[in-house]
Image (spheres, rainbow, N blue to C red):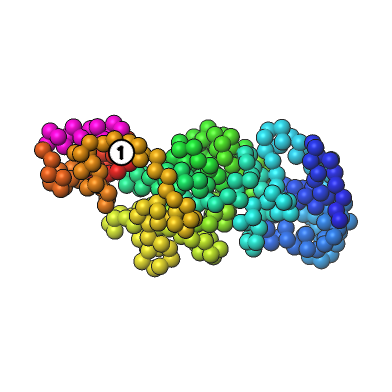
Amino acid sequence: MYGNIRLKGMQMSDLKCLIIFLSQFDLTISKMKQILDELGDKATIDGFKKSKLVKNNVLSKENFDKMVRDADEKLVRTYCLNLQNRGINIVTKFDEDYPEKLFDLDDAPYILYYMGDITIANLPSLSVVGTRKPTSYGRMVTERIVRDVASAGVVIVSGLAYGIDSISHKKCLEVGGKTIAVLGGGFDHIYPTEHYNLAMEIAQKGLLLSEYRPKRSATKYSFPQRNRIIAGISEGTLITEASIKSGTIHTKEFALEYGRNIYSVPGNIDNVNSELTNEIIKRGHGSCVTKSEDILKDYQVSKNNNTQTNIENVDENEKVILDALANGMKSIDDLTRETGLSINVFNTSITTLEIRGLIRRMPGGVIALN
């Protein structure tokens, strides 16, 4: 059994103390595993200092000597207290509250820094990822599906980036759902900086998560790495719009590797933003999704139709329009022709439905259900 040190009313094992110490040196997961395996039941800071890691070629003498100079349990305790005072908590792979869905992954991080409610990481969740520059179609589809899925109680996971990521987080919060943002760097370097306020709102109402110490900046390498957490922490991953060259492909590959469900929204075959989604469907790597129910059935929950009351109060002409849009968005000309309504009645009904938030005008004279 490992001994314990007292940390602000919490019990922190010597093993946890060691892992927090090692995390300051940006070790790879494989290197961290090598060190812990080598130390065995002496996996403590004191055991590290007395180890034969250099002799056994686990660490170079230069790196080992440098690490030993900072190997002080009191410094680790002070570091943790300072983080706690900032609302930043730490969970290691050996703690009971470590996310269950990550635990069995070969490349699961040994340490996670978090702000917010770590328990929601064990709830049913859906990762939503895609392009940083979505079309109006991609935005609409993402908002609609996230609204329904989050309203049904499924946690929404994404990466706080521009585009699909931030759209997903915002829509989830808007409907009162729970969302998890997985960062590509530490909490002192929220990226993009424009999403700092969004990150803090997520920390208050959901969970902000990173495997990187707070002072670690995001890098070109760290973003693909964090995508494995986005894929691994959810039962499924939804891709609404993304090109073949998008970083989204990393999340898709991790989801495949982990045996997670992949959901893909079909798009315009001439639009670069639909390259990856259409390719996933064509190759059978994921399910084709055209409505939220395609996803919710796998979570065994039903759609919570928050607009039902508004729909029940529509008049006969408005209902004709809603019925015509049930199978997908339509141009104004096609919708007018299909409904058979006079221009005056049609325009009045469209305006009323738009004000009530039941439909949306899209670029190019297209109308869609909201």
Query: Does the magenta portion include 338?
Result: no
Could you tell me residue 65's position as x and y percent?
A: 82, 52
Query: Does the magenta portion include 352?
Result: yes
Could you tell me residue 269's position as x and y percent?
A: 29, 58
Chain part drawn in magenta: 343-356
- Can residue 166 be seen at all in this image of the molecule? no
Q: Secondary structure at mark 1?
A: helix
Could you tell me residue 24's position as x and y percent?
A: 72, 47
- Can residue 351 be seen at all in this image of the molecule? yes
The dominant secondary structure in magenta is helix
Residue for point 47% across, 52% down: 301
The residue beneath circle 1 is: 312
Asked where in the image residue 196 lies, by quadrant, the reply is top right
Furthest residue in direction bottom, as rendered:
283
Q: Nearer the viewer, residue 94 or 318?
A: 318
Q: Nearer the viewer, residue 177 or 48?
A: 177
Q: Nearer the viewer, residue 166 or 118?
A: 118
Residue for point 69% across, 61% down: 30
Could you tell me residue 193's position as x and y percent?
A: 52, 36
Q: The N terminus lies in which quarter of the figure? A: bottom right
Residue for point 81% across, 49% down: 13
Apparent side of residue 50 relative to residue 17 in the rendered image (left or right) = right
Q: Amino acid at mark 1?
A: Glu
Apparent side of residue 258 relative to residue 87 in the rendered image (left or right) = left
Apparent side of residue 278 relative to residue 235 in the rendered image (left or right) = left
Residue for point 77% across, 60% down: 35
Apparent side of residue 368 relative to residue 304 in the rendered image (left or right) = left
Other residues around mark 1 within 10 Å, as few (<14) / some (14–19) / many (≥20): few
Q: The C terminus lies in which quarter of the figure? A: top left
